[in-house]
Image (tube, rainbow, N blue to C red):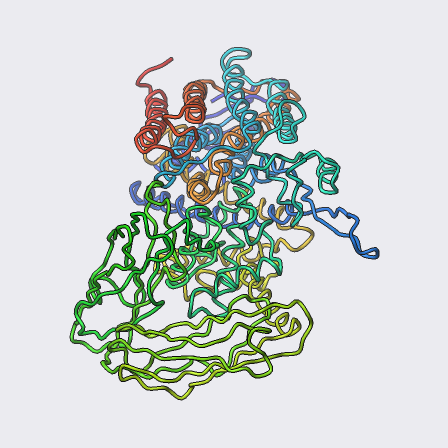
Amino acid sequence: MALGLDDGTMPDVEVGPDNSYIIDNKTYVSKDEVYNGYKCADRGILLPFISEYTWSIEVRAFLYLVGLLYCFLGVAIIADIFMGAIEKITSKTRKVYLTSEKEDEPEVIEVRIWSDAVANLTLMALGSSAPEILLAIIEVIANKFEAGALGPGTIVGSAAFNLFVISAVCVLSIPKGESRRIKDIKVFAVTAVFSIVAYVWLLIILKAVTPNEVEVWEAAVTFLMFPLLVLLAWMAEKNFCGIPNKTDTSKQIELGNFQPDTENPNSSSRCGKVLKLCGLEFRSESNADKFLRDRQYFRDGRLDRDGLVAFIKEVKNYPGLTDEDAAILAASKLVESQSHSRMWYRVGAVRNMTGGRKTQPQLSTKLKVVYNAMNEHPDAPTLGEVPQVKPHQNAVIDFHAASCAVMEDIGKFKVAVCRSGRLDNRVSVRVETIDGTATEEQDYMPINEVITFEPEESEKFVEVEIINDNQWEPDEEFFLKISLLMNAEEREGVQLGRISIMEITILNDDEPGVVMFQKRGFLVKESIGNAVIPVVRKNGADGEITIKWRSIDKTAVSGKDYTGGEGVLTFKHTEIEQNIEIPIIDDMTPEKDEHFEIELFDPTGGAKIGQINRTAVTITNDDDFNNVLNNMMQMTNANIHAMQVHHETYVSQIKDALNVNGGDIENATAGDYVLHFLTFGWKIIFALVPPPSLLGGWLCFVVSLACIGLLTAIIGDLAAIFGCLVNLDDAITAITFVALGTSLPDTFASRTAAVQEKYADNAVGNVTGSNSVNVFLGLGLPWFIASVYHYAKGSKFKVEAGSLGFSVGLFSGLCIITIALLMARRMFSIFGKAELGGPPCPKICSGIFMIMLWLIYVLISAFQTTGYFNF
């Protein structure tokens, strides 16, 4: 034991009883003597809280592992709140005023203040990497400004997991036949280069310039690379040098409903001037882009009246949907139309892991079927609008009716699939069943088959089998769905009609039924186009029946206000609902409410007319329709508000913490309940963090960061003591347990972004930037603090290269290989010319290869640390 006084003289030391020492009449006991038999008790900063001296090593190791995993969930939850604060901060906008046709009212658009590149590399990178960065800082300070192995090892191990495993997961997760490219390739190029330079620079510091030592200037350069990275990425995003990015449309969404002049993108239009003022560029718009823009309901991801009216018209083509259903579908479409950051996907992943409130709308079975059908047209797979039927160009396939009812003991029956429009070609579609309250194999036999219409063939039948279980059950329903085939050649010349989903109700009745209107009156706007009036068949659905209808003028006159007449409705066996479509004439003149009536008469096939044999259709004026529309907008806004990532008040924050799935119990799954139970304690504690609405989100930012720091210190203790108990070196614990625990939410977030986004930027584009920031902040900052401290004390800041230097060198080499693979996937057609997805075989091979690189990194680093070989 080395002893010495401040003046350099040696004190008088005497040996006392029980291996103690007497110095200046004071008794001291050595550290080894204190902890003799109490293994690893000196490894923590805060832990252990209580004495574990009598506990077995096996029990302690198990408890520390469980505690480590539980604290990872806690970090994920407080990081969710931290991300909410960042979203509040980075969502700030500035107003730009434009001249308008109204002399006294200028047009106003809002442009985001934060650049995407700057936001991603500063606050958002800090949000996703805060645990790793704070772990390295806390470890250095707790070790009295001496280097540790856990913090740096976690940063390098997390970088390896992010680049190799997350990239592999994203490549493999893309649906068959699809691919994703990085849109902002210039920003990605900057971050990719820096992600290599960062780790090569670490290797130079540790091995070449000052081996096993970090000087002040080296730490300062490491830290200053962070603002340099942000600056260069911002310059690349703004295109201060080089050729304009032809696919850069990220800024157009900030300009609301204004659209660029595609014929002259650099014209002096008011939007062009605003974009140039903001340092932005227009792009030339392709025909495909123009088609998508024209078809989209909510073009800028914002709710507007015109878009909502168009969307509601489309929703009303699917019978049986309420205004509340339409509002939920509109909210879903709005969320899909908006541009999301990587942070949004990470928050969603964390909430899925903890049974919290979802960031995407939760649709019922029926609404999912309708929403998927609306998104299925091959020319616009994500926009939702069913195209206008073109009978001379395409064959139109749909069901004869939107719903039917059958008895449970019917056995097998046939459903008609009709073809109209073009008849001279051979077309195929897929028909499949989807569970409702009735389930396959229990209530009916599942169907998933392809039916083919030969030329001039206009009708096919699908055989449906109902299972009779001889037990009483309430009426149940399931769905038949028509969809187009995946092969592009088989989709040519065919499209789905209006009734591509059919609801089948299982009931106990064999009467022809009673036919009547669903309601005594209907309210429509003059500009609705077609008024759809449902006629229902109740108290039986056996046999084919017909019923006639006619319109009767009242204050509305046929030919002037609507197109009336008469017709015949045919209900085939088991069908229970048909629609009468009446075109409404919009004369664009202000009028009072007008109405006409529709009457049912002369039923056949044994059917009877029910109580409601007449219905009144009222054509409303704009004011009344505006009230209805305002109602819809309020309901849609309420659904959107419920899905925002941050809370405005303490009340909503605590309510979310107390309730599973954020209070949406109806859509909560069993897994949500289990995860909510496991994380309930963390949720209650962190619900006391100030909500992001206070002080622009900065108060929540600071308090959340402090909570993450405290929890990270505990995680560092848990990992260090657990590794010690199971005889794992800190370097191995860091690149395995700790790195995986901190990176798991990012894995789920990247996978979701890869599947849902049009581009790959939020999936893998931000991985390289995050890896760079981890080094510049997670090592540059604590090393700078420690090196300055040692310089002031006249000593040297020692950082043993050893395992860290080997791990950094190995990762740098594998990092270059992985980035080269991603670029090769982008360039060569064998991979589909895209970083993610593409042809099945190359996609699978690429994913397996990157996972193998991660396994190689972990195994070789572990073998080197344990002394199996040295370099």
Q: Is residue 808 above or below residue 490?
A: above
Q: Position of residue 858 (x, y in %)?
A: 35, 27
Query: Residue 558 vs residue 55: left or right?
Result: right
Which quadrant is the C terminus positioned in? top left
* Image label count: 0
Quadrant location of residue 566? bottom left
Q: Is residue 720 visible?
A: no
| Residue that protrudes farthest toward the right in the picture | 104
The residue depicted at 60 percent of the width and 53 percent of the height is 302
Judge by depth and name the residue closer to the eye, 88 or 731.
88
Query: Residue 277 vs residue 750: left or right?
Result: right
Q: Position of residue 468 (x, y in %)?
A: 17, 71
Q: Position of residue 694 (x, y in %)?
A: 67, 55
Quadrant location of residue 562? bottom right
The residue depicted at 51 percent of the width and 55 percent of the height is 333
Judge by depth and name the residue closer to the eye, 179 or 740.
179
Query: Residue 17 vs residue 635: left or right?
Result: left
Q: Is residue 743 visible?
A: yes
Q: Is residue 392 above or below residue 123?
A: below
Quadrant location of residue 558? bottom right
Q: Position of residue 434 (x, y in %)?
A: 30, 60
| Residue that protrudes farthest toward the bottom in the picture | 611
